[in-house]
Image (tube, rainbow, N blue to C red):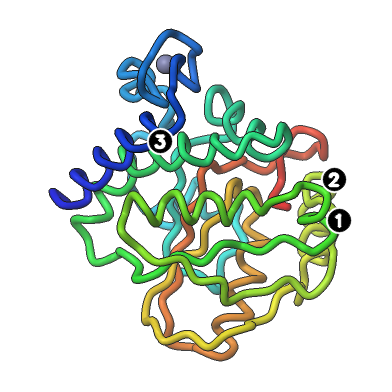
Amino acid sequence: MGSVTRLTNVWEQVSALLTHHKHCYVCKQSSALLVCEYCRYDTSIAHFEVPGFDLLEKPSVSEHLVSPYYHHLYALGKYEGILKALINRLKFSKEPLAAQVLSRFFVDYIYPRMAHTSELPEVLVPVPLSKWRYAQRGYNQARLLAHALGKRCDLPVYDCVKRLRHTKAQSELNREQRLENIHDAFALCSSIEYKHIALVDDVVTTGATINSACKAIVASYPDITVSVWSMALSPPTRTKTQNSGDI
Ligand SMILES: [Zn+2]
């Protein structure tokens, strides 16, 4: 972990020098760093009692998820408050810098505990967008997150999954519709020579999207271990307008 911490500090300093930060990206207070010291240690970012805990081992979380094809799930916190604001800036306000901030929090809160287990992946795989969504947004937020996380954790990023077709935004659908919408929407586009990979996404709600991507991987590599690194978890609700959704 020591080498990763040193790498993270160096990256933060280089990032600050390159972008000449004058204000904290989160609270807007004067700061030479992208995230000021106050926000960096703001524990309200990570809502779960034990940051870095495998959420698939938490029945209150896992009972809501579609998860037969992945083995571990990590998220910074619930999709609310500062975390929700940061994800929305990344996803809907064309602010790719938010990926740097989210990755900073993920590595501070989640990575240290994972580093003490055998659950570390060898590579990060971003959940792909459809060509239509990519053209609309201009970038894949999951890919930005994967690269930011990869720099901080010294892990490579591997685009080995593609989306076969455009799907409706999951946020517009209920649980059953989400499953149908995303069914067989992904395929492998490269071979995988790793034993443990981590799929990276911004928000997990029902898990239908990541599970569908995992299904495409596991179909060819049944013995592979798949972790999911998500910035937030959005508990499913009955209404269709309250969730961000995994799109
Ligand atoms: Zn701040």
Q: Secondary structure at mark 3?
A: loop
Three-letter residue code for mark 3: Phe
Q: Position of residue 169 (x, y in %)?
A: 82, 51
Compared to residue 27, the image places residue 93 above or below, namely: below
Q: Residue furthest top?
A: 29
Q: Disc 3 designates what residue?
A: 48
Q: Quadrant of ligand 1?
A: top left
State the count of labels: 3
Nearer the N terminus, badge 1 or badge 3?
Answer: 3
* Residue mark closest to the camera, 2 vs 1: 1
Q: Residue at x 38, y 19 (%)?
A: 39
The local crowd at label 2, few if under 14, some if 14 to 19, many if 20 or more residues have their Cα within 10 Å, is some
Residue that appears at 34% across and 25% down: 40
Name the residue type under label 1: Lys
Q: Is mark 3 within 8 Å of ligand 1?
A: no
How much space separates mark 1 and mark 3, taking CA atoms? 30 Å
Left or right: 6 with respect to 80?
A: left
Give the SS element for disc 1.
Answer: loop
Q: CA distance from mark 2 to mark 1?
A: 7 Å
Decide if residue 72 is in sight here: yes
Asked whether disc 2 touches disc 3, contact meaning CB atoms under 8 Å apart, the reply is: no
Circle 1 residue: 168
Q: Is residue 87 left or right of residue 31?
A: right
Estimate the spatial distance between the alpha carbons at disc 2 and disc 3, rounded to whole Å: 26 Å
Image spot of residue 14 (x, y percent): 33, 37
Residue under the point 39% across and 57% down: 150
Q: How far across and down, in percent of the image, does residue 79 sit? A: 58, 34
Contact between labelled residues 1 and 2, with CB atoms less than 8 Å apart: yes
Q: Secondary structure at mark 2?
A: helix
